[in-house]
Image (spheres, rainbow, N blue to C red):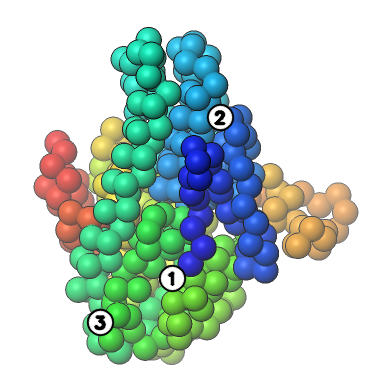
Amino acid sequence: VNEPLFLKNGKLFVLDQRLLPHKIKYIEIRSADEGFEAIKNMIVRGAPLIGITAMYALAVEAQKTTTPGHLLKKTSKINSARPTAVNLNFAAEEFSALVKKYSDKPDFNKIAMKTAAAFHSREIKASRAIGRNGAKLIKKDSTILTYCNAGALAAPDFGTALAVIFEAFKRGKVKEVFTSETRPYLQGMRLTAFELQNAKIPFRIISDNTAGFLMKKGMIDAIVVGADRIAANGDAANKIGTFALAVLAKYHNIPFYVAAPGTTIDFSIKSGGEIPIEERSDKELLYVGGRRIAPNGARGLYYGFDVTDNALITAIITEKGIASPVNKNTLAGLLGKR
Ligand code: MRU
């Protein structure tokens, strides 16, 4: 698949995911402010990728100036680009700590770039381990439903939920994948379908409102999704619509798995009610492909995410192993946090 982000001769490039799957275009990020815009406007998206982009964009800024006040201001600006994915907060915290400790060093620009690269490579390792751990849960000949995009375009290098699906497919366990279109921004239809097609995994796209019917017909064996922030008790925020799928899964007795790296778990908050939920412009809802569909003057309401209660999640799959049942003890036990 096309890399969502790369560095070339110290320059940072990101793939414009708004144009996928029909156009492959990379954009250079030349400053922290351009990183902010890329995250805010969803040129890059997906919780881990947002954090990585922020780290590199700040490191790019540090190539121009190492004045601590300036860098801290840019860090807090980029941290506000999208509120739900905690990976962005972690990136900002790590960069602020770095600035406070080392910005007076003559080679701070190099330290910043090295730290960004280390942040990036931690997520690469997590992805593979999530895939291996999650594949064990998938039964032979499974039909899997996934939602939004939690693949290589969202997290290096195979993503999270899709890392599980890719690995299970490699082990011969996946018969077919259903990717739900994911209104309003269509990450499932545009991005997940693109990745599944490139990986030659049999799949079909369904409209979001088809999922319940497929479950009722016995056509779904497991659901695997990603997460943007998981509270200490395992309540998980993910793309709006995830909660409804989890409720449907419970009703139909279908396992519902959330795949995410440790960097998506926010042990500082007790439960999902404390997770900030992004509200985006209703333009993304009322317009499709740049064309207004809703009546002129009509207003929309568009929350980007919802929270799935821990009791609805069969297991959380991390790089450190599987938390099941999902609660604060199983998660803390896995990640070593108290
Ligand atoms: O609004 P998006 O496209 O950034 O939302 C992405 C998701 O909801 C993903 O499932 C989540 O970030 C996990 S990505 C590995």
Mark nearest the camera among 3 and 1 is 3
Q: Quadrant of the C terminus?
A: top left
Image mark for residue 146: 1
Q: Which residue is denoted by mark 3 in the rendering?
A: 171
Q: Quadrant of residue 155?
A: bottom left
Q: Residues within 10 Å of mark 3 (few under 14, many from 20)?
A: few
The reply to whether discs 2 and 1 touch (Cβ–Cβ < 8 Å) is no
Task: Kindly identify the residue that appears in the image at 25 percent across and 73 percent down.
Answer: 135
**As drawn, 142 above or below 93:** below
Q: How far across and down, in percent of the image, does residue 41 sit?
A: 64, 44
Q: CA distance from mark 2 to mark 3?
A: 42 Å
Which of pointers 2 and 1 lies earlier in the amino acid sequence? 2
Q: Residues within 10 Å of mark 2 (few under 14, many from 20)?
A: many
Which of pointers 2 and 3 lies earlier in the amino acid sequence? 2
What's under tag 3, amino acid-wise?
Arg
Q: Quadrant of residue 238?
A: bottom left
Q: Quadrant of residue 252?
A: bottom left
Q: How far across and down, in percent of the image, does residue 292 sit?
A: 82, 59
**As drawn, 261 above or below 111:** below
- Viewer-proximal residue, 67 or 289? 67
Which of pointers 3 and 1 lies earlier in the amino acid sequence? 1
Mark nearest the camera among 2 and 1 is 2
- Viewer-proximal residue, 139 or 304? 139
Task: Kindly identify the residue that appears in the image at 40 percent across and 32 percent down.
Answer: 113
